[in-house]
Image (cartoon, grey):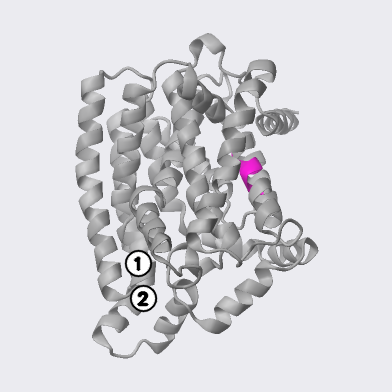
Amino acid sequence: MTQPTPESERIVALDALRGIAVIGIVGMNVLAFALPGPAYYNPLSYGATSAPDYWVWLGSFIFIEDKFRTLFAMLFGAGCLILIERGGAAPWRAHFARMAVLLGIGLIHATLLASNDVLRAYALAGLALPWLARLAARALIAVALGLLMVHLALGLVVLGAPLVAFYTQQGGADALLWAERQFGHDSPTILMLLEQGRGGLTERVARRSLGIPAQLATVAASLPLNLSAIALGMGLWRGGMLKGEWRTFRLQRVAGIAALVALPGLLGLAAWLVASGFPAALVGPVALVLSAPFDMALALSYAALAMAFLLKNRGLVGRLAAVGRLSLSNYLMTSVILSAIFASWGLGLFGEVTRWQAFALGLVPIAAMLAWSPPWVERLGQGPFERMWRGGARALSYTRKT
C-alpha cells in the first residue's frame, strides 16, 4: 500500500482546490437534506416563497450545481492516478481494494445519512481506472469528452420523451406524470417525501437498505458523466496542470476560455427555464443533461484559477488546503451536521425552511470544516476517515494476497 504524501511533496494549490470542492458541494447537498427531492432542481416544487429563494436558485444553478461535484470527481481521478503512479509492484490490487472499501463507506453513508452520496459512483467508476491510467494526457481528455457525449445521448433518450410530449402536446401522459413526480410539484409525491424525510432513523435505515439495488441502478446511470470528470482530472494531472507546472498566464487563459463557454450556456438554460415557468419535463433534461457540458467547463475554469492563484500555504489558502487534506472526513462530517439540523433525530427542520434559509444553514458545516481542519492536520495529519479508508484497503489488499 502507498503511504500519505510527505509534507514537502504536497501541492498547496491542489489541496486548496480539493478544499474548495468539498466546501462547494455543501451548497447543493444542504438542499437534499432540507427539502423534498424535486426541490433540489426545481425552485417551484417546494421551499421557494420569496425573491431571495429565486436568486439563490439562480446563483446555485449558474455557479454551484454540479460544478463542485464535477470538480470533486476530477480531483478524485487525479488522486487515484497519483496513488497508482506511486503504487509499487502491485498498484492495481491496492487500487481495487481502495475502491471496494470506498464503495462500502458510500453505501453506509447513503443508508444512514445522505441518499445522494457520490462515493458509490466514484468507487464504481474507479474500477475503469486500470485501463485509463495507461493513457497519455490528450487521450484521457479525449476519453472525457467522449464519455460526456455518451452521457448527453443516453440522457436525452431517457428524458427526451416527456420533453417532446410537453412541447408537442401529443401523447406522453405517462412520461409527463413521471417527470412531474421527479422534477415537479406533484402534491401526493411531495407529501410522501415530506413524510419519509420526517421519519425516524430506524425507518430510514430499513427503507434505504431495501432500496440498495435501486440505488446502485441509479448510480450506474451516472457512471458515464462521473467517469468523464474523473478522466478529465487524470488528464489534467498527467498534462501538468494539477501538478502546478503550468504558467499563470496559461492557467488564466484556460480559465477565461472555459468560463466564456460555460456562463452564456448556463444563463441561456436558466432563462429558458424561467420563461417556460419551470415545467418538470424541461427541468429534468436541463439539470441532468443539457447543463452537463457547461458544468464541466466551469469546473475546469475553477480548477485553473485555483492552480494560478492559491500558491502560498498561509491564511485562507492554508485553511482551504487543510480542508482539502481531510476531504473524505469533511464530506462525511458535513452529512452528520446537516442531519443534526434537518433530520427528525436532530432539530427536525426538514421541510420547515425555505430555499434561502436552507442555503444559509449550509454555512454551519462550512464554518466547522474551516475551524477544525487546520489544527487536526497540524497535530494528527490524516483525517479519521482517511485513516479508515487506507487501513481498510490495506487489510483487504493483504487478505487478497494471502
Residue topped by disc 1 = 285
Taking the view exactly as shown, the residue that stands out farthest to the right is 202
Q: Position of residue 277 (x, y in %)?
A: 32, 75
**Whether label 2 touches label 1, CB < 8 Å:** yes
- Residues in magenta? 331-335
Judged left or right of residue 107, residue 124 is left
**Up-down: is 215 above or below 26?**
below
Which residue matches tag 2?
A: 281
Foreground of the two, 352 or 103: 352
Tell me which amino acid carries mark 1: Pro
Give the quarter of the figure containing the N terminus: top right
Horizontal and vertical percent position of residue 366: 56, 39
Q: Secondary structure at mark 2?
A: helix
Q: Where is residue 60 drawn, in percent x and y?
A: 40, 53
Q: Is residue 267 magenta?
A: no
Of residues 388 and 40, the one drawn nearer to the viewer in this rendering: 40
- Report the Cα–Cα distance between label 2 and label 1: 7 Å
Q: Tell me if residue 337 can be seen.
A: yes
Q: Is residue 306 left or right of residue 20?
A: left
In this rendering, the answer to whether 131 lies above or below 278 is above
Disc 2 marks which amino acid? Ala
Q: Secondary structure at mark 1?
A: helix
Q: Nearer the viewer, residue 198 or 262?
A: 198
> Residue 261, image x and y in percent?
21, 46
Q: Residue at x 67, y 49 (%)?
A: 109
For residue 163, what is the image quadrant? bottom left
Residue sitting at x 25%, y 72%:
275
